[in-house]
Amino acid sequence: MVISDHNVRETLSVCDRAYILNEGTVLIEGLPEMIAESKIARKFYLGDDFRF
């Protein structure tokens, strides 16, 4: 199943794997915990203050 949503915290809590896209390109993929801690994900999408 594919979920596309801007409620990142809630979406990551129900996913086995996550992908963050930027302009049609996969920036990062992996386990939700890895995405939440990723410097790349924080820079382009989550922001520095994101807490999972």
Image (cartoon, rainbow, N blue to C red):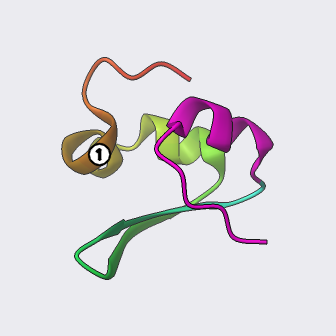
Would you say 50 lies left or right of 7 here?
left
- x, y percentage for residue 9? 57, 31
Q: Residue furthest bottom?
A: 24
Would you say 1 lies left or right of 34 here?
right
- Residue 13 shown in magenta: yes
In the rendered image, which quarter is residue 2 located in? Answer: bottom right
Disc 1 residue crowd, few under 14, some 14–19, many 20+, Cα 10 Å: some
In percent of the image, x 39 and y 44: which residue is there? 38
- x, y percentage for residue 19? 52, 64
In the rendered image, which quarter is residue 49 located in? Answer: top left
- x, y percentage for residue 24? 30, 82
Between residues 10 and 30, which one lies in front from this camera angle?
10
- Which quadrant would the C terminus be assigned to in this image? top right
- Residue 12 shown in magenta: yes
50 vs 8: above or below: above
Q: Which residues are magenta?
A: 1-15
Would you say 34 lies left or right of 12 here?
left
Residue assigned mark 1: 45
In percent of the image, x 65 and y 43: which residue is there? 11
- Which quadrant would the N terminus be assigned to in this image? bottom right
Between residues 50 and 11, which one lies in front from this camera angle?
11
35 vs 28: above or below: above
Would you say 32 lies left or right of 34 here?
right
- x, y percentage for residue 26? 38, 76
- Identify the amino acid type marked 1: Tyr
Look at the numbered disc 1 and give the secondary structure of its residue.
helix
47 vs 11: above or below: above
In percent of the image, x 61 and y 39: which residue is there? 33
In percent of the image, x 22 and y 50: which residue is there? 44
